Image (cartoon, rainbow, N blue to C red):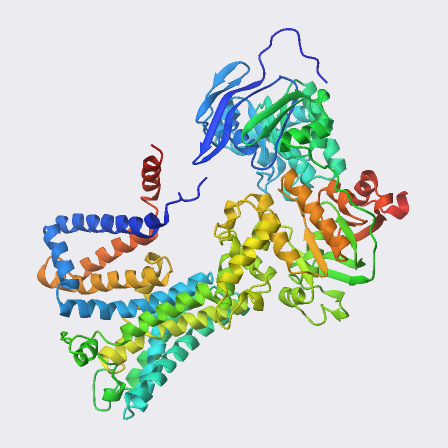
């Protein structure tokens, strides 16, 4: 922790009364806060709290209706990312802005090549990056093609890009969403190093743990306004969560012990290949038992998504069997619709692009996959009354806001979209529920609600398989944990023997049998 | 933030298209002015040529009938995420089916010929759409390319058939013999005459009513049935369709069959209603106008009917205009149509932002 310096040095970045409206939405209400030079400043808030809008104003994507931005005490006008960069502000987006088939070096100089010929700029960049690597411990193979690098290194390239452009203030938007716990630790060590060198970092996240672990100060936003600004050491996990949501929250879902019953879904020696013939899932074998939640952990891209999609019937496996109610779904070649009829429901990982049609109204989304069920159909025409009533009932039971079935789905927040998808799949009374990223992009209040629903479903004797990149979520919900690495189920842990470290090691490919 | 500005429904469906249309007419006026004619009198001629008399109204709606069928064909494919450029060829081959039934059953009464002719038109049109659909669904050949190709193939095939097979013996021009009266679509003036309303004799015929029925059925199908729902899901988001157990290839084939069948309706109007024989190039570009009609009508049957009447009016009024103002020839009329397509279709969002800003300012005092 940096002690506040006695001399009144101006803050690295100061916001005064930033205000922004989008039509009727008041996204930022008179936001003021200051980032002390050489510190790590956390910015937390639920989805829709206005964090992204604020960062986009600082980085010049949006223009504030009112207010002032000061850098090192001087007021600056920022109306474009170029001006933000000129003012010494760098941003690492959640989705990397890299050209995948360029080398690291080419990506770094992109846009600041300097001169008509590349060679000079590249040589200069090579020298400069060498210096940055030494100063900050940011080693990256400069001539490697970006798409060949692991995600953690790609993120490092983004940071290098910002530093190469002489950023003094670095904004990181949800930087750990794609990292393993170990990679996240590396990132935090790197950030600490940047702080030592006098740089300032703004860490935008919804993960309270990260705020507690690495920040010096934290600003909490709710409904477009700053509700708290505190030194991190003066607050606690629970205190921050309550400020964020505006009421007391349960950080851990309360649940009794599982009472596993008979296997409902049996997977045997399942192999899945992608379009290029590469095996994405290699010989997966496991059972899902009635009355238990199984968590499938792994770094994104290690076959969990493919496994989930294959179970749901979206992908065809190249080998193996999936048994449900004594029937082999693979050999019979059952499509997702037929699987739903057998009691296999699926909440996909990418709900916006797979689980729903964003431009359709909520009520049309509430029947997706069940649109030919007799409940929603007369003889020839759809039963509009039943569809509307069904949607209203789901919205009421799952507290979807606003409860307007006619509203286009894209107008709902991520949490409310997810609640509607869950309502649709759970209301169909499935035996087995497959859920990808149950709470991705969902705010804390809704997370609590969703977790309770899932536990209730387990207690009603259903089998649940949860794929999540949030280790906290798996640890909080699962009764049994499978870990995937490189397409293999590398190990299985009962909840009692699972720790973040053990799972993290397995996610990184260290087999449990060998290590522990 | 690049999403188009939101407008209230009335402005979206009424005001914005009206503004676009006025802008297109103003631009056309500038062109007319450059040619040395008075834009206002040109516009008056165009309007009276399209709607000024029973005769002109009859012709306008007769042209519109073709455009409704092809516009619906394009729209159904569009909702399934497919750009069917082949309505021209599908209408051509669909008309062949209708024409063959009319030639073979010529002596039979209308109520025998009629259902079979409708059926044959739909089946032939659908069959012509099926091949590109199958190639797209099962082989990944792009439907835009294949449907364009199939227009040419249809054209060549029809030329061959008319020149070598169906031509009336002892005649030079490549046309079949005339249908028997049992294969004539009842003209509207005749139907109105039966209930005592006098109307000038024009090619405007009962097929217009069929086109309106088709529009109503398309609306019911797309927005009120589970099959229409599946079709729209597949068109909006193929991944969501697969997730829901809807097979996008099957939707592609089904939507194109329906699309081709609708395009095949053109023969009912053009052959049974007006020409009373099979002849070369009877679709006359209506398949392509159908693309503009669907675009302008926002792929909604009501919008398509309105847009089809507008284009019918431009066709009919335009020919009147070129007749009365020699400086404005047929090509000029095509330019005006082009400007309407440009402003109402391709650049329909030109005035959206300013209009949205204007309406917002009014709402917030």
Picture quadrant of residue B220: bottom left
Q: Residue farthest to the bottom? A: B107
Residue at position x 47%, y 29% from top? A20
User: Observer-nearest residue: B118 or A340?
Assistant: A340
**Residue B205 screen position, x and y as percent:** 23, 76
Relative to A169, residue A61 above or below: below
Instruction: Judge from the rendering whether residue B44 lies leftward or rightward of residue B9; answer left or right.
Output: left
User: Observer-nearest residue: A3 or A453?
Assistant: A453
Relative to A35, residue A296 above or below: below
Q: How many marks?
A: 0
Instruction: Judge from the rendering whether residue A381 lies leftward or rightward of residue B113; answer left or right.
Output: right
Instruction: Judge from the rendering whether residue A239 lies leftward or rightward of residue B297; answer left or right.
Output: right
**Residue A448 screen position, x and y as percent:** 68, 42
Picture quadrant of residue A182: top right
User: Observer-nearest residue: A395 or B220?
Assistant: A395
Residue at position x 61%, y 37% from top? A94
**Residue B169 screen position, x and y as percent:** 24, 91
Q: Residue farthest to the top? A: A7
**Residue B269 screen position, x and y as percent:** 27, 76
Instruction: Judge from the rendering whether residue A500 lies leftward or rightward of residue A226; answer left or right.
Output: right
Relative to A41, residue A464 above or below: below
Residue at position x 19%, y 69% from top? B59
Residue A137 in sight here: no
Residue B131 in sight here: yes
Quarter containing the C terminus of chain B: top left
């Amino acid at each position: 922790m940096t002690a506040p310096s006695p001399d009144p040095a101006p803050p690295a970045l100061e916001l005064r009364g930033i205000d922004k409206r989008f039509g009727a939405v008041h996204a930022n209400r008179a936001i003021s806060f200051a980032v002390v030079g050489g510190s790590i400043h956390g910015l937390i808030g639920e989805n829709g709290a206005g964090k992204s809008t604020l960062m986009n104003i600082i980085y010049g994507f949006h223009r504030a209706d009112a207010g002032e931005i000061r850098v090192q005490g001087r007021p600056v006008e920022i109306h474009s990312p170029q001006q933000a960069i000129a003012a010494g502000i760098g941003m690492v987006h959640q989705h990397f802005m890299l050209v995948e088939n360029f080398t690291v070096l080419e990506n770094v100089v992109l846009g600041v090549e300097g001169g008509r010929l590349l060679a000079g700029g590249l040589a200069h960049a090579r020298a400069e990056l060498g210096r940055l690597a030494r100063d900050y411990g940011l080693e990256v193979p400069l001539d490697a093609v970006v798409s060949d690098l692991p995600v953690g290194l790609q993120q490092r390239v983004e940071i290098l890009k910002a530093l190469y452009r002489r950023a003094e203030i670095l904004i990181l938007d949800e930087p750990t969403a794609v990292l393993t716990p170990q990679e996240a630790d590396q990132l935090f060590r790197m950030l600490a190093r940047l702080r030592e060198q006098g740089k300032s970092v703004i860490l935008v996240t919804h993960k309270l743990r990260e705020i507690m672990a690495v920040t010096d100060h934290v600003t909490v936003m709710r409904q477009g306004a700053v509700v708290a600004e505190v030194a991190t050491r003066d607050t606690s996990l629970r205190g921050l969560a309550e400020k964020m949501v505006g009421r007391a929250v349960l950080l851990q879902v309360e649940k009794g012990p599982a009472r596993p019953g008979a296997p409902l879904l049996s997977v045997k020696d399942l192999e899945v290949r992608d379009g290029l013939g590469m095996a994405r899932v290699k010989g997966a074998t496991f059972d899902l038992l009635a009355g238990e939640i199984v968590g499938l952990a792994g770094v994104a891209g290690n076959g969990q998504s493919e496994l989930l999609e294959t179970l749901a019937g979206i992908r065809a496996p190249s080998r193996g069997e999936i048994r449900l109610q004594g029937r082999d779904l693979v050999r019979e070649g059952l499509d997702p619709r037929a699987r739903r009829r057998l009691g296999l429901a699926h909440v996909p990982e990418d709900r916006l692009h797979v689980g729903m049609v964003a431009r359709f109204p909520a009520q049309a989304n509430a029947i997706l996959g069940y649109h030919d069920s007799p409940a929603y159909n007369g003889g020839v025409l759809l039963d509009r009354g039943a569809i509307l009533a069904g949607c209203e009932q789901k919205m009421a039971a799952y507290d979807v806001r606003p409860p307007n079935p006619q509203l286009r789905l894209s107008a709902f927040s991520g949490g409310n979209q997810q609640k509607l998808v869950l309502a649709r799949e759970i209301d169909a009374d499935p035996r087995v529920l497959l859920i990808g990223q149950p709470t991705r992009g969902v705010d804390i209040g809704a997370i609590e609600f969703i977790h309770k629903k899932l536990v209730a479903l387990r207690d009603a004797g259903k089998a649940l398989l949860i794929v999540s990149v949030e280790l906290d979520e798996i640890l909080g919900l699962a009764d049994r944990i499978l870990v995937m690495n490189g397409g293999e189920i590398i190990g299985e842990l009962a909840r009692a023997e699972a720790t973040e470290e053990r799972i993290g090691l397995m996610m990184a490919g260290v087999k449990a049998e060998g290590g522990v | 933030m690049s999403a188009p500005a939101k407008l209230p429904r009335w402005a979206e469906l009424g005001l914005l298209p009206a503004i676009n249309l006025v802008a297109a007419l103003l631009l056309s006026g500038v062109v007319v002015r450059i040619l040395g004619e008075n834009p206002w009198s040109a516009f008056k001629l165009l309007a009276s040529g399209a709607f000024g008399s029973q005769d002109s109204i009859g012709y306008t709606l007769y042209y519109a009938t073709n455009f409704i069928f092809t516009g619906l064909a394009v729209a159904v494919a569009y909702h399934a995420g497919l750009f069917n450029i082949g309505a021209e060829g599908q209408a051509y081959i669909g008309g062949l089916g209708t024409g063959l039934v009319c030639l073979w059953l010529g002596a039979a009464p209308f109520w025998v010929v009629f259902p079979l002719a409708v059926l044959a038109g739909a089946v032939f049109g659908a069959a012509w759409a099926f091949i590109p659909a199958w190639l797209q669904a099962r082989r990944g050949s792009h439907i835009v390319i294949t449907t364009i190709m199939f227009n040419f193939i249809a054209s060549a095939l029809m030329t061959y058939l008319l020149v070598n097979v169906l031509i009336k013996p002892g005649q030079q021009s490549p046309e079949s013999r005339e249908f028997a009266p049992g294969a004539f679509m009842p003209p509207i003036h005749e139907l109105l005459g039966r209930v005592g309303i006098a109307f000038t004799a024009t090619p405007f015929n009962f097929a217009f009513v069929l086109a309106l029925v088709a529009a109503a059925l398309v609306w019911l199908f797309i927005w009120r049935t589970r099959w229409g729902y599946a079709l729209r899901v597949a068109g909006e988001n193929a991944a969501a369709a697969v997730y829901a157990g809807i097979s996008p290839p099957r939707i592609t084939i089904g939507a194109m069959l329906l699309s081709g069948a609708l395009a095949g309706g053109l023969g009912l109007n053009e052959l049974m209603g007006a020409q009373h024989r099979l002849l070369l190039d009877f679709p006359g570009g209506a398949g392509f106008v159908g693309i503009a009609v669907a675009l302008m009508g926002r792929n909604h049957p009501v919008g398509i009917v309105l847009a089809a009447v507008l284009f019918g009016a431009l066709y009919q009024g335009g020919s009147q205009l070129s007749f009365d103002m020699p400086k404005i020839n047929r090509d000029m009329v095509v330019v005006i149509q082009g400007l309407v397509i440009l402003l109402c279709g391709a650049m329909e969002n030109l005035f959206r932002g300013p209009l949205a800003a204007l309406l917002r300012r009014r709402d917030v005092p």
